[in-house]
Amino acid sequence: MELSRMNSSFQRKLAGIEVLICDVDGTLTDGSVTFSSDGSEYKTFNVHDGLGIALAIRHGLDIVFMTGRISEMVSRRAAELGVTTVLQGISNKRDAIDALAIVKELNLDAVAYIGDDLNDLPAMECVGLVFAVHDASEHVCRQANFVLNKCGGHGAVREAIELILDAKVGMDTVVETYIAAAKQNTSKPVKQ
């Protein structure tokens, strides 16, 4: 849905978001976990989501990765993108968000969450705005304020970020800032 077609109440909610908490498996990835014969774990992340995360951080939107699993791949991807808060091995995501709100002094109305499956439901109950990836479970879609057009691991996080940034500063401004920065720093590519 285009921002211009959304109601003004939802636009105000988007504009007030300061933190986006992203589930990992099924949201930042397509939900696949691959193990090699030596036990190594592999995950695939989408570069469109990566660039969206870089844009979000550049425009003051705090990004948090939260997952029930523990994976070096998640830490590595977060470090590449400049995501400084990575919560892994989280069995109760609502308690983790409550603790994060205390540490970061967050108003939970200014926090958005994006997820895909039943383990995300408790987290979705305590934040101000909830996104579900397109291929999320039916229960998650019913809990969401907005069901995205993109599936997990296929640009859904970028879609959510663009909705937020469009409401906050306008996507034209985001794109202009990105192009201006790219022109000034042609030797160092942006991590995606």
Image: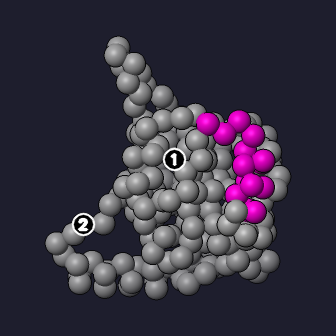
Residue 131 sits in which quadrant? bottom right
Q: Secondary structure at mark 1?
A: loop
Label 1 sits on residue? 28
> Magenta segment, principal secondary structure?
helix
Within the magenta stretch, is there residue 95? yes
Confirm whether residue 140 shows in the render.
no
| Mark 1 vs 2: CB contact within 8 A | no
Q: Quadrant of the N terminus?
A: bottom right
Q: CA distance from mark 1 to mark 2?
A: 22 Å
Crowdedness near tag 1: few (<14), some (14–19) or many (≥20) residues, C-alpha within 10 Å: many
Residue 38 x, y percent position in the rendering: 34, 16
Query: Colour mode?
Result: one colour
Residue with the most extreme top position: 37
Residue with the most extreme right position: 125
- Stretch of the chain drawn in magenta: 89-102
Residue 116 vertical placement versus 169 (above, below):
above
Residue 24 x, y percent position in the rendering: 55, 44
Label 2 sits on residue? 189
Residue 69 sits in which quadrant? top right
Using the image as rendered, state which of residue 83 and residue 6 is in the foreground: 83
Q: Is residue 49 left or right of residue 63?
A: left
Residue 182 x, y percent position in the rendering: 27, 77
Disc 1 residue type (three-letter): Leu
Disc 2 residue type (three-letter): Pro
Which of the numbered marks, if any, corresponds to residue 60?
A: none
Residue at left offset 45%, top offset 75%: 58
Residue 107 x, y percent position in the rendering: 77, 70
Residue at left offset 56%, top offset 62%: 63
Q: Is residue 154 left or right of residue 12?
A: left
